[in-house]
Amino acid sequence: MDYSEVIEFVKKTTSETDRPGTYPFRNAYDHTMRVYRWAIRLQAKLGGDLDVIVLAALLHDVGWDNERPSHEVSAEVAVEYLDSIGVEPEMIVRVGEIIMMHKDKDTDKALSLECCIVMDADLLDEMGAIGIMSDCMEAGLDDEASYKRAYYKIKEAYRQDKPKYSWCKTETGRTEFAKRMQLVESFIYQLERELF
């Protein structure tokens, strides 16, 4: 399947309906493309239906509505779009189910491999180096921006993110998550040595 048309649809749709953001450097399209790339990497190691994984990863955050949960809106938009381009009904159902489930990261329900991969790819985004960059950029926009404020933001994000390891659905996801947390730990340690 050629994904370029789907990517263009996601780019156009998210630019029109992107959720209101606190920070100008964060947007749904960039997040989606990172999740898409991680989903492909995970699928290469774990298997699963590549088309289902890619379509779910690309469309998982395509919808937004102030009144309804984004995963519901995204699933509706995805199903309607996939039907309009002639995707088989069985695949549409599988993609829609993954999009509906992807927010429920701490679930212990039995999930398809494809769903596990998309959930891990989504969880991995903004962990590790990207998370550090995001925290620094957020801190830089504060009225009283400083290296110490960035340090405390990174340290707090690490404290909140580290327990999410248990949300990983695959061993490959857990391995990558652990590497990213180790990177953040090392960064915090070095930053403490240089700041204090």
Image: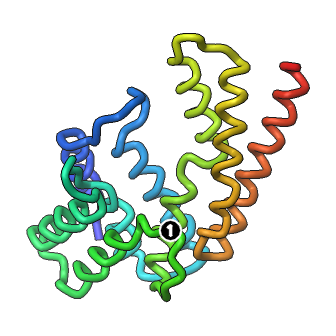
Q: Quadrant of residue 157?
A: top right
Relative to 87, is 180 on the left or the right?
right
Relative to 120, is 78 on the left or the right?
left
Of the pair 45 and 128, the residue shown nearer to us: 128
Q: Quadrant of residue 167?
A: bottom right
Say what amino acid the circle numbered 1 marks: Lys
Q: Which residue is mark 1?
A: 105
Quadrant where the C terminus lies?
top right
Q: Residue at x 38, y 63 (%)?
A: 57
Of the pair 19 and 89, the residue shown nearer to us: 19
Q: Quadrant of residue 85?
A: bottom left
- Name the colour scheme: rainbow
Residue extending farthest to the left is: 84
Classify mark 1: helix, strand or loop.
loop
Q: Residue at x 79, y 36 (%)?
A: 187
Q: Residue at x 24, y 82 (%)?
A: 93
State the image coordinates of residue 54 (x, y, percent, origin top left). 38, 67
State the image coordinates of residue 185 (x, y, percent, origin top left). 80, 44
Q: In the rendered view, would you say 81 is above or below 130? A: below
Of the pair 69 and 165, the residue shown nearer to us: 69
Quadrant where the N terminus lies?
bottom left
Q: In the rendered view, would you say 161 is above or below 105? A: above
Q: Residues within 10 Å of mark 1 (few under 14, many from 20)?
A: some
Q: How many marks?
A: 1
Of the pair 155 and 24, the residue shown nearer to us: 155
Q: In the rendered view, would you say 137 is above or below 171? A: above
Residue extending farthest to the top is: 144
Q: Residue at x 28, y 57 (%)?
A: 70
Relative to 138, is 74 on the left or the right?
left
State the image coordinates of residue 45 (x, y, percent, origin top left). 61, 74
Q: In the rendered view, would you say 139 is above or below 182? A: above
